[in-house]
Image (tube, grey):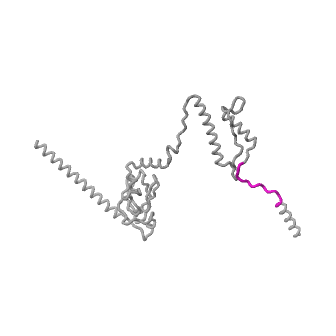
Amino acid sequence: MATALRTGASRAGAALSKSPKAPARRGGLVKIPRETRKLMLEMHKGLYPQMYDANGKPKESIEMPRTVWRGRTGGINRTAEMLLRRRREEMFYQFYRKKLRQKGIPYRPAPDIKKTCPDPISAVTASQIALLDPTGARTRLFAKDNPECARVGDILLVRQRTGDPFAGVCINIRRRGVDTAILLRGQLTRVGVEMWYKVYSPLVEGIEVVQRRVKRARRARLTYMRKVKHDRGSVENVVRVYLRQKAALGSADGGKKKMGAAAGGKKGGKKGKKR
C-alpha cells in the first residue's frame, strides 16, 4: 500500500514537472495591437480635426506609435508617458504657430523657468529673511563668516514680545535658512530646562550675547552638558551682572547727554543777555 502511494505521488510530480510553465513577465517593448492603433487614430481625429481634410485623411504624415515600453509589472514606463506627452504638446504648438503666422501675429514662447529663476528655493528663502530681518542683525549674529557671531557654549538672553525673557547656555545652533533655531539650556526653580527659539520668529524681540565662552567648543552640539558632571547650572547671576552693567552704561550716557544739553542752554541764555 505504501509503495502504491509513493508511485502515485511520483507520477503526479512528474506530470506537474512536464506541464508547460507560464512565461515570466519581463520588461521591454511590446507591440500595440491593430485595434488599439485604430482606436488611437480615431481619438486623434476627434482631438485634432484641423489636421485632417474632409475625406478624413491627414494633411501631414502622422506617425502613430507601434510599440510601448512596459515594465515587469506590466505598467507603462514613466519615460514613455513623458515622451508621448511631449510629442502631443509639440504637435499642438506646431499647429498654433502656423495659425498665428497665417494671421500675422508674432508667436512668443513662454520663458524658461530655469533661466528666469534657476534656484527658486534660495530666492524664496532670501525674500523671507529680508522680510523678517530687514536690518540683517540676526543674520550677522549667527553667520559663520562673522568673527563675532554667537557660538555654541555662549550664554544668550532671548527677549520675547509676550512672556518673560529666558537666558541659558547655547548647546545647539540649527541653521536652516528661515527656520534657523537655537537651543538654550538653563534652570527654572532648580530644574534643568531646554528651550528652542526660532531666530527669525516675529515673537522674538531680541537676542543678546551675555557672556562668551573662553575657549572654542570642540563639539557642534554640547549635549554632554545635560549630565550632572558637565551641567552649567543656573546663569541668573551672570545675567544679573550683565544687566546691571548695561544699565550703568546707559545711565552714564544719558547723564552726559543731559549735562551737554544743560551747558548749551546756559551758553545760549548768556548770549541772549549780552545782546
Q: Which residues are magenta?
A: 16-29
**Residue at (73% x, 46% y) in the render:** 31
Of 254 and 132, nearer the camera is 132
| Residue 108 quadrant | top right
Residue 18 colored in magenta in the image: yes
44 with respect to 165 (left or right): right
Q: Indicate the position of residue 175 as horizontal and vertical percent values.
A: 45, 56
Can the viewer see residue 188 in this picture? no
> Which quadrant: the C terminus?
top left
Q: Indicate the position of residue 228 as horizontal and vertical percent values.
A: 43, 70
**Residue at (42% x, 52% y) in the render:** 200
Q: Indicate the position of residue 256 as horizontal and vertical percent values.
A: 22, 53
197 with respect to 94 (left or right): left
Can the viewer see residue 130 in this picture? yes
> What kind of secondary structure does the magenta stretch mostly adopt?
loop
> Which quadrant: the N terminus?
bottom right
Residue 33 colored in magenta in the image: no
Q: Residue furthest left?
A: 274
